[in-house]
Structure formats: C-alpha cells, structure tokens
Amino acid sequence: MTRIPGAAPHAPVMLAECLAHLAVKPQAWYLDGTFGAGGHTRALLEAGGNVLALDRDPSVTRFLPEDALASGRLRFVEGNFDALDRHAAAAGVGPLAGVLLDLGVSSMQLDEAERGFSFRHPGPLDMRMGPTGLCAADLVNSASQEELASVIFRYGEERYSRRIARRIVEARAKAPITTTDELAEIIARAYPPGPRRDHPARRTFQALRVAVNDELGALERALAAAERALAPGGRLVVLTYHSLEDRIVKRAFKSSALLTPLTKKPLTASPEEVAANPRARAAKLRAAERVPNGAAATDAGSGANAADDAARAGRFTRGALAPPHATPDSTLITLWEDR
C-alpha cells in the first residue's frame, strides 16, 4: 500500500484474484500495463516473477522499487499499453508469461487535484494521463454542442448529455471553462432537481477523460497486442471499472481464436475489500489464457481452471442507454483536435 501525501493510501485492486489467475511462475516475465503506484508490480515480484512495467505517467517513477531495478528483475518503460507487444520486444523480455491491465484512472491521479481528473477537488481541467496532448479544457471549449453531447453520451452513458452540452456551450460563451469545480457546477445546474445517488458530474467527467486519453481505442489495441506478446499458456488478466470497458474485454475474449476465457462471468471484489478500498466496488476481473500454437480456443467453462477452483474453494474471497462501443471513434476526437 503506497501512501500519497495528503491522500488516501493506494491499495492494488483484487490483488489475490489477479495473482491466482496469472499463476505466477518464478523468473518468468510478466507485464504490468498500468504501473501506477506499483502495488500489483510489487506483488508479482514478491511471488517470484520478473516484471516489465509500463505507464503513460512519468511521475510514477518515484514508486519504482530500486532493489528490483538494480537486480534486473524489474524494467520500466514510459509508454501506453496499447503498444505493449512492441515494448516487450524492445526490452527483450518476450514472449510473456502474463499480462495485467488495471484500467482507468488511478486513485493516485484522482487524489492529485492538479491532474484535473476529479470533480471533488478544484484544479485545472486537464485529465491527461500523460504529459502531452490536448487536455479536457481543449475539448470542453472547442467542440461543438453536438460533438460534446455525443462524447458525453457515448463514453459516459449520460442520459442528460444534450442538456449538459447545451449548458457547457452557454457557459463558455461568457468565458472559457478552465477548472474542474467550474465544470462540475455547470453540469450540476443542467440536472433536474431531485434526490440522486451519484454526483451529477461523475458520468460527464468519465466521458471527457475517456475521450481525451482515447481509453477505449487504447484498450482494443492493447488486447490485440497482448495476444501477440503472450507465450502459449500465458495469461491475460484485465480489471475494468465501467460497462464500456467490460463489453470490449468480453467481446475480445469471446471472438479471439488465440485466447480461451478463464472466467465465464467477471469476478468482483469481496465485500471486505470494498469496505477497505471503495474503488474496488466497480471492478470486474476477466482472465484468459493464450492457447498453444496450432490449438483452437475454447469457451470458458469447458474445463475448470485452477484459479476459479481456488476461488470456489475459498482460498481467496470474492464478491459474489448508450450503444456498445464498437471501434475507436476517432471522428469525434479529430473534429475538435483539428480546430
């Protein structure tokens, strides 16, 4: 658990389940596509594996274990996991015994107000996972009302997307929208009165973050790259946090000729973990195995795998209106990038 000054401790989500489905082998190479604060990577190292860690955010290098770097058991690359096969090849560590993708924004990034991910912390309207590229303020202040409504609906599954887009355009006509709290207030005013379970800005902030970082397109490319990078018998474990991500992973596992799903249904965090780490509440874990060369993939459930057997036996615990995203919708991004 890594403590960030002024923030809650970072705990790796569904750690026991990830390790069980990766079936870590001593001295084999594993790829952690989202290093973050390093919780999953440390666990893989402690289990005896070697790790190639990736992250788009250069600030995470402060969490790299120096002893593992010095011994050569850990290597770090600043880059996107959508090119993980190329990163592994360049590092000379493939084929891989396993790939772990923990998707979305990290607790650390949410807690750092200057990153602009959270509607709960005043900060600049940024939302970039890396240091380069256009930020959320560029999208919010440049996209047309129709483009904004489409982004918010597609990537946030927000029923009031058109209302919110209209309010954003009205507000920016007076002055550019540059901070998270300013945008959150505009979104809240667009909502009809009445009790609500979630903050009104939650879905819109998710949508903007997904669009700014091309998260769904990167996920689709990463799943294909993992197929290429895994050794026969290698494992792919993916943690998703919203339905758009989970649909992509489910569809990719089902349609792949090279991957056999190990989880018929996604696993969720145990009630105990959710109580200790609220971020785990939305997590869903899906796992698959790279088939041997020349073999055909089979459906999940055709043979019980050791990790699911272990879960059922109690060796670790687990908790029991937009169209689906089909391909990266680069058109929406291009429209406002080219302005």
Image: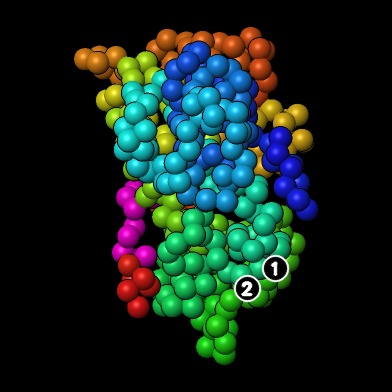
Q: Amino acid at mark 2?
A: Thr
Asked which secondary structure carries label 2, the reply is loop
Asked which secondary structure carries label 1, the reply is loop
Please check the rendered image and state whether residue 326 is part of the magenta-colored stretch, yes or no: yes
- Closest to the observer, 337 or 312: 337
Give the mark nearest the N terminus, 1 or 2.
Answer: 1
Which residue is painted at 58% across and 46% down in the image?
60
Residue that carries the numbered disc 2 in the rendered image: 179
Q: Is residue 211 above or below residue 86?
A: below
Residue that carries the numbered disc 1 in the rendered image: 122
State the image coordinates of residue 78 (x, y, percent, origin top left): 45, 46
- Closest to the observer, 109 or 220: 109
State the image coordinates of residue 179 (x, y, percent, origin top left): 62, 73
State the image coordinates of residue 158 (x, y, percent, origin top left): 54, 60
Mark 1 surroundings within 10 Å by alpha-carbon count, few (fewer than 14), some (14 through 19), many (20 or more): some
Q: In this view of the protein, can residue 254 be seen by the observer? A: no
Which residue is painted at 52% across and 72% down in the image?
137
Callout 1–callout 2 Cβ contact below 8 Å: yes
* Res 310 → quadrant: top right
Q: What are the residue bounds of the magenta stretch?
A: 325-333
Which residue is painted at 62% across and 52% down in the image?
109
Q: Amino acid at mark 1?
A: Pro
Which residue is farthest bottom?
174
181 horizontally vs 260: left or right: right
State the image coordinates of residue 274 (x, y, percent, origin top left): 72, 35
Label 1 vs label 2: CA separation?
Answer: 7 Å
Q: Is residue 235 above or below residue 157?
A: above
